[in-house]
Image (spheres, rainbow, N blue to C red):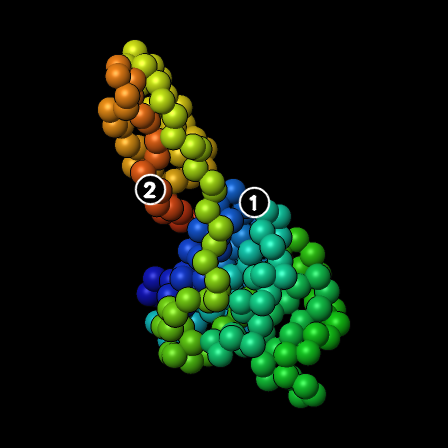
Amino acid sequence: MPDYYLAPSLVALRTEINRRWPKRDTESDGWIGNASHAARQSDHNPDYGAGGVVRAIDVDKDGISVPDLLGAVVRDSRVAYVIWNRRIASATDDGIPWDWEPYDGTNAHEHHVHVSIRHTRAAETNVAPWFKSKPPSPHAPEGIDVTRDEVDEVVQLYALWSRVNELDAEIAVAIAKGDGVRVGILRTHRAPLEAKRLIGDGK
């Protein structure tokens, strides 16, 4: 049986979520279905007829803005349906597409947002940005003037700040007035994040 994989479009969504909320909780994250999912129809199960693609992810609600996430995925042309907090919104609803309706599945989805994409190659492979606005960046500490003896200590403090905020930082050191030295953060880059979890019960 071939290997399974998460649809590239959902990998892109997860990457954007991680960059937007680098300190978020991932306890309820998931994409590969467990035995319960395997026993029934679920987008968390690999579609081996299409090469093993998985067309759904769950995103933990803690540490993110759920309204912002819903704003990014609901009505996106790649998405088939979204489940959140006992409600479901679907692109193919028999009534009004994308209106929120009660969801009575075994998992109420109160701890995570479920996103399923359409069963098309276009939906699977389209990695265009999901969020329309750029994620906020932590405000870098102001540059400071120090003595030459203090440079190493201050550089280490800036490096610690970068690690805490999960950033790759370029720290600049420049000669200031007299015997002083100016130390500051020149620019920062988001550090890459990856996650893979086995999900529990749910759609």
Quadrant (top left, top right, bottom left, bottom right) of the N terminus: bottom left
Give residue 89's quadrant in the image: bottom right
Residue at 53% from the left image edge and 67% from the top image edge: 72
Residue 18 screen position, x and y as percent = 46, 51
Q: Is residue 111 visible?
A: yes
Real-space Cα separation, disc 2 to disc 1, in angstroms:
26 Å
Residue 42 screen position, x and y as percent = 55, 69
Q: Where does label 2 land, which residue? A: 187
Badge number at residue 58: none
Dot 2 falls on a residue whose secondary structure is strand
Residue placed most toward the observer, 155 or 24: 155
10 Å crowding of disc 2: few (<14), some (14-19), many (20+): few
10 Å crowding of disc 1: few (<14), some (14-19), many (20+): some
Give residue 105's quadrant in the image: bottom right
Extreme residue toward the top, this view: 149
Residue at 40% from the left image edge and 62% from the top image edge: 12
Lateral position of residue 148 relative to residue 161, left or right = left
Disc nearer the start of the sequence (2/1): 1
